[in-house]
Image: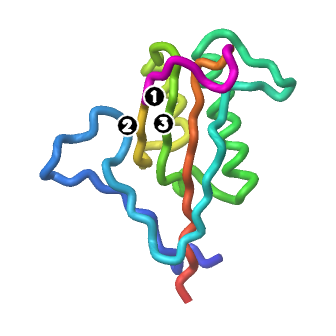
């Protein structure tokens, strides 16, 4: 694929609304004819099926699992267009932001965060869902 001939995903923060309160973009524009990928919510589970007790350990494994999913589909973090985060306890934003920037750099996808009473398993404290798009090559 010729990278110069690929349409780009665009991220915007319009000046007529307040700046984002975190590391995200208000708007993500997906080029026409892009392939859209939806991924199940990822959890902080290790390769042996263990779920650590601490939320930061779960965040750590969740980001590893997200990166592996992207690689499996030949995508990069730049292809991520939307992130939904659900947590059952207070997020350590310093830790999560560090992992976030290690994965996404400073090109942030759109994001929603919600605190919920529970997730699919009682030991889960965080779940992160991503959406991604692969723009079509321009011919």
Give SS at disc 3.
helix
- Taking the view exactly as shown, the residue that stands out farthest to the bottom is 139
Disc 1 residue crowd, few under 14, some 14–19, many 20+, Cα 10 Å: some
Above/below status of 57 relative to 30? above
Location of the C terminus (image quadrant): bottom right
* Residue stretch in magenta: 114-122
Disc 2 residue crowd, few under 14, some 14–19, many 20+, Cα 10 Å: some
Residue located at (15% from left, 52% from top) = 15
Residue located at (61% from left, 58% from top) = 37
Q: Is label 2 in contact with label 3 (beta carbons under 8 Å)?
A: yes
Above/below status of 88 relative to 80? above
Give the mark count: 3
Q: Is residue 45 left or right of residue 47?
A: left
Q: Position of residue 133 (x, y in %)?
A: 55, 62
Q: Is label 2 in contact with label 1 (beta carbons under 8 Å)?
A: yes
Q: Earlier in the sequence, mark 2 or mark 1?
A: 2
- Taking the view exactly as shown, the residue that stands out farthest to the top is 53
Location of the N terminus (image quadrant): bottom right
- Whether residue 71 is in magenta: the answer is no
Above/below status of 130 relative to 126? below
What residue is pinned by disc 1?
Answer: 97
What residue is pinned by disc 2?
Answer: 23
Disc 3 residue crowd, few under 14, some 14–19, many 20+, Cα 10 Å: few
Q: Position of residue 106 (x, y in %)?
A: 41, 44
Residue 101's tag is 3
Residue located at (64% from left, 17% from top) = 57
Q: Main secondary structure of the magenta part?
A: loop
- Taking the view exactly as shown, the residue that stands out farthest to the right is 48
Give 118 or 14, whichever is nearer the viewer: 118
Q: Is label 1 in contact with label 3 (beta carbons under 8 Å)?
A: yes
């Amino acid at each position: 694929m010729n990278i110069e001939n690929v349409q780009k995903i665009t991220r915007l923060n319009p000046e007529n609304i307040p700046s984002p309160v975190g590391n995200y973009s208000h708007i993500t524009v997906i080029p026409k004819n892009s392939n859209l990928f939806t991924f199940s919510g990822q959890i902080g589970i290790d390769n042996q099926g263990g779920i650590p007790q601490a939320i930061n350990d779960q965040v750590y494994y969740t980001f590893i699992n997200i990166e592996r999913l992207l690689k499996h589909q030949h995508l990069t973090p730049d292809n991520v267009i939307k992130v939904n985060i659900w947590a059952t306890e207070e997020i350590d934003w310093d830790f999560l932001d560090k992992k976030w920037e290690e994965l996404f750099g400073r090109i942030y996808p759109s994001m929603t965060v919600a605190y919920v009473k529970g997730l699919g398993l009682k030991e889960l404290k965080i779940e992160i869902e991503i959406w991604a798009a692969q723009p079509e090559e321009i011919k």
